[in-house]
Image (cartoon, rainbow, N blue to C red):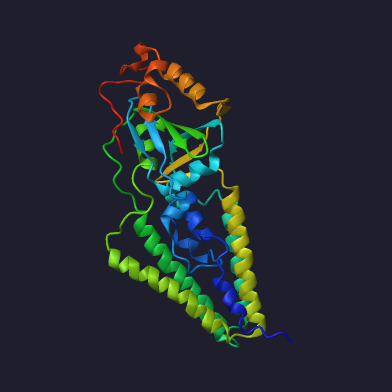
Amino acid sequence: MLDLTLLPILILAAPSVIPPFYLHAALSGRPSYSDIFLLCLGMQTPLSPTALNEGEYPAVAAMTTGYVFRVENQAMVMFLQRVGRTGHLVTLEVVSDPAGESGRRLTRPRFHMSFWISALLLACGLRSVRADWFLVSSVSLLLLSRLLSIISLRAKTAPSWHGASEPGTEGDLLILLSQDRWVRMRGLVDDLKAVTSGSWLHEADNPVVMQAFEWTARVLVYLAVVILANATRENKMILLADLFISHGVLVFSNAQTKGLRLNSRKINISSNEGSIKSYNRRLDLAQDLVKEIGRSDWAIRLGIINPEEVDPASRGTESKYQDPEHEIVAM
C-alpha cells in the first residue's frame, strides 16, 4: 500500500504568489471573521501588497481640475489591471456602498458555496473525533491561523485618511495603465479619493502585535502539517480534499468577481452605452476627452498630448465641471 505519511506536506503548496483568500479580501473589501472558514493551500505564504499591483502605480489626471498624481492603492490598481484592455478606454463608476463592509457577502453565492463545502467536508472528517485527535488538532490550528491573519488584515485595512471632504462635487479621472490600457473613473470626489488615495494596507495601531500575529499564523500552518502526519490515512485524505476543493472554489469565485468593494465603495464598469471604447491611438483618446471636458491642461501634464496640438482656448482652467469653490486635491 502506498505510504501517505508525507501527504500533509501538500498543505504547504502555493499554486500562486498571492493566496486566494488574500485576493478575495482585496476584491471584496475588509475581511469578515466568517472568512475564517475559507481554507486554501499555501496559507503560510505572507502577503506582499506590491504583488497585487505587480509594482505598478499608474499616473492619473483629474480632468475637472488638471491635477496629476498616482494611484497608490494596490487593490485598486489590481482591479484596474483586470478590467483594462489594450487600446480601449474603459469607464468605471464609483458609488457609495450603503450596505458597507458588513453586507458585502450577502450577495456572494460563491462565498456561501465555498463555506458550505468546507463545513461539510470538515464535518465528515470530524465525525470520528474520538478516534483521531490529530485531525481535530490540525484543523484547529488552521482555523486559528486564519483567525490571526484576519485580525491582522482587518487592522491594516481599517478606514484611514483620504483628504478633505468635498460633498456633492463630481470628479472625473483618467488613468494610464501599462500596455496602453486606459481607464476613466467617474463619481463623487469623496468616493474617488476613498478608492485611489493611500495604500491598501497601512500600518496598524499596534504594529508589533500585528506582526507577531502574522508570524504566529504562518508557524501554525507548519505545525498543522506536522500533526496531521500522525492522523489516519482516511483523515489525511479528507482534510486534503477539503483544502483542494475549497481552494478551487475560492479561485473560481475570485475569477468571476466583476466589481470591487473598497473602503465602503463599489466600483463597476459603467452600464451606459460606450463604456468600453476602442481607439487606434492615444492621441485620438486625448483629443476626444479634451473636446468633451473643455480643457487640456490635464492632458499636457499627463504627457499624452503636446501643447501645440491643442486649441489655446482649451488650456485654461474653466470646464463644464469647474466650480471655483471645489478643487480635487492631489492625493
Q: Nearer the viewer, residue 117 or 17?
A: 17
Q: Is residue 215 left or right of residue 133?
A: left
Residue at image point 39% right, 73% down? 216
Quick one: quadrant of the N terminus? bottom right
Which percent across, then down, holds residue 168?
34, 28
Residue 160 vs 250, above or below: the answer is above
Number of marks? 0
Q: To which quarter of the image does residue 250 belong?
A: bottom right
Quick one: quadrant of the C terminus? top left
Which percent across, then down, holds residue 164?
26, 37
Residue 192 vs 43, above or below: the answer is above
Residue 74 vs 21, above or below: the answer is above
Q: Nearer the viewer, residue 263 or 212?
A: 212
Q: Nearer the viewer, residue 98 or 95?
A: 95
Q: Is residue 330 left or right of residue 21?
A: left
Q: Residue furthest right?
A: 1
Which percent across, then down, holds residue 72?
37, 45
